[in-house]
Image (cartoon, rainbow, N blue to C red):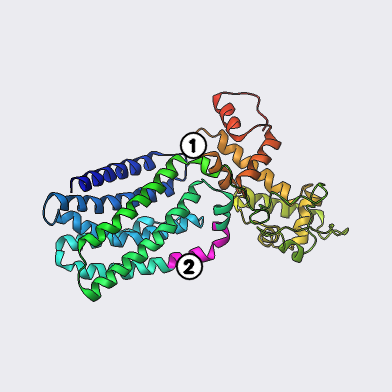
């Protein structure tokens, strides 16, 4: 028993410290860190209750009731994490945590309502689980791009968290259903489940904080699997790859993950000068106001759709009227944005997170493009600009 007490105290100390460290860390995605911290806080409630049971028979009732109410918390947090992974911050997330507060108040007022609260909590968690699974399915290309092209970013570790939260919520649902069928389950069952959950949550939280880069040093991005639009495939003879698109059918082949060799641009023009100027202004508005270049799945057909023209017309706009190619245009926009973040003293994001937030398909393409444009590594660029006004290539 003394060994179990010591282990629980260690877990509680590590959990509390990790939650505080995540809230104070500004080197990654603040929203993701908040979700981590909330999960760890919920974990503290359960572990504190199990520790109290070792000190007195039955433990502290208030902690036990709070631990029961955490079932109402896991569903919304899973949904919240999936929304973040999909690139859409949830609106008014605090409202989704309100049922947890109501369940906690109900249990505090009527402790005997525990089975009813747990049953309703299971339905509540199931609804959020189904919504989360739907979002995961709809955003699979983005998740694959994060997993394969952006290891060790905030979003990468978020995927690990989501990957563990799904079976955890399913396990909670199964235990609630089993309890309704066979009667209340012993608290020891939940205690034994809490140990691996604690270990997993702490491991992911610490990895997110310290980012063990050596795990990824030998990792290669699969050729053709997540190649970014700003990183075009090289030709077999080593010549400059084609950067023109002639038809929507050819442009469709340029979606993320597929190599394409585009035919030459048609010799005739479809856009007169006045229309081209209007489209150029619209393109600038999409890039400046909406920051469309940050969309890692952006392709020429999708850009053309946003402009209300065909893919060939979008290619003509870029190549003929603006004097650049689709790949070069996106790369320059993304590099400009990355440089602004690196120069901003208030931005403490890690370089790998800046690469992802700027829209690059993977870290390697970002470093290559950055070195070619600026003549130095991103970390050196950041250091020089923050140390003082020095002559650094823009």
Residue 103, percent from left and from top? 24, 62
Magenta stretch, main secondary structure, is helix
Identify the element where label 1 is drawn: loop
At horizontal 75% and vertical 66% (from top left) the residue drawn is 249
Res. 301 in view: yes
Q: Is residue 356 left or right of residue 28?
A: right
Q: Residues within 10 Å of mark 1 (few under 14, many from 20)?
A: some
Q: Which residues are magenta?
A: 131-143
Residue 221 magenta-highlighted: no
At horizontal 49% and vertical 35% (from top left) the residue drawn is 346
Q: CA distance from mark 2 to mark 1?
A: 33 Å
Q: Nearer the viewer, residue 154 or 168?
A: 168
Q: Mark 2 — residue?
A: 134
Residue 201, percent from left and from top? 37, 51
Residue 296, percent from left and from top? 61, 53
Q: Is residue 24 left or right of residue 324?
A: left
Q: Is residue 85 left or right of residue 271?
A: left
Q: Nearer the viewer, residue 50 or 359?
A: 50
Q: Mark 1 — residue?
A: 348
Is label 2 in contact with label 1 (beta carbons under 8 Å)? no
At horizontal 47% and vertical 41% (from top left) the residue drawn is 211
Identify the element where label 2 is drawn: helix
């Amino acid at each position: 028993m003394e060994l179990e007490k010591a282990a629980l105290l260690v877990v509680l100390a590590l959990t509390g410290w990790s939650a505080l460290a995540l809230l104070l860390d500004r080197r990654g995605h603040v929203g993701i860190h908040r979700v981590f911290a909330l999960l760890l806080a919920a974990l503290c409630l359960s572990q504190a209750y199990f520790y109290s049971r070792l000190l007195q028979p039955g433990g502290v009732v208030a902690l036990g009731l709070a631990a029961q109410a955490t079932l109402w918390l896991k569903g919304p947090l899973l949904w919240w994490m999936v929304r973040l992974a999909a690139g859409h911050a949830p609106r008014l997330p605090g409202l989704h945590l309100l049922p947890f507060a109501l369940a906690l108040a109900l249990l505090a007022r009527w402790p005997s309502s525990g089975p009813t609260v747990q049953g309703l909590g299971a339905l509540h968690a199931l609804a959020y689980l189904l919504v989360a699974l739907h979002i995961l399915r709809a955003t699979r290309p983005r998740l694959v791009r994060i997993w394969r092209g952006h290891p060790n970013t905030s979003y990468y570790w978020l995927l690990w968290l989501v990957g563990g939260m799904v079976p955890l919520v399913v396990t909670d649902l199964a235990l609630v259903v089993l309890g309704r069928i066979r009667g209340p389950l012993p608290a020891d069952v939940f205690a034994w489940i809490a140990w691996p959950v604690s270990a997993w949550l702490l491991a992911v939280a610490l990895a997110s904080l310290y980012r063990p880069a050596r795990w990824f040093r030998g990792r290669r991005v699969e050729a053709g699997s997540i190649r970014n639009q700003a990183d075009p495939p090289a030709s077999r003879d080593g010549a400059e790859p084609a950067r023109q698109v002639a038809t929507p059918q050819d442009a469709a082949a340029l979606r993320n993950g597929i190599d394409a060799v585009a035919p030459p641009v048609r010799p005739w023009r479809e856009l007169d000068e006045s229309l081209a100027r209007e489209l150029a202004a619209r393109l600038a508005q999409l890039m400046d106001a909406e920051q469309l270049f940050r969309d890692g799945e952006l392709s020429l057909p999708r850009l053309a759709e946003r402009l209300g023209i065909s893919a060939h017309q979008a290619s003509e706009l870029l190549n003929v009227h603006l004097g650049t190619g689709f790949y070069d245009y996106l790369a320059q926009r993304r590099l400009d944005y990355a440089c602004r973040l690196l120069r901003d003293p208030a931005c403490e994001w890690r370089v790998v997170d800046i690469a992802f937030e700027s829209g690059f398909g993977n870290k390697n393409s970002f470093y290559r493009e950055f070195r070619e444009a600026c003549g130095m590594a991103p970390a050196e660029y950041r250091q020089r600009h923050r140390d003082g006004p020095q002559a650094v290539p823009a």
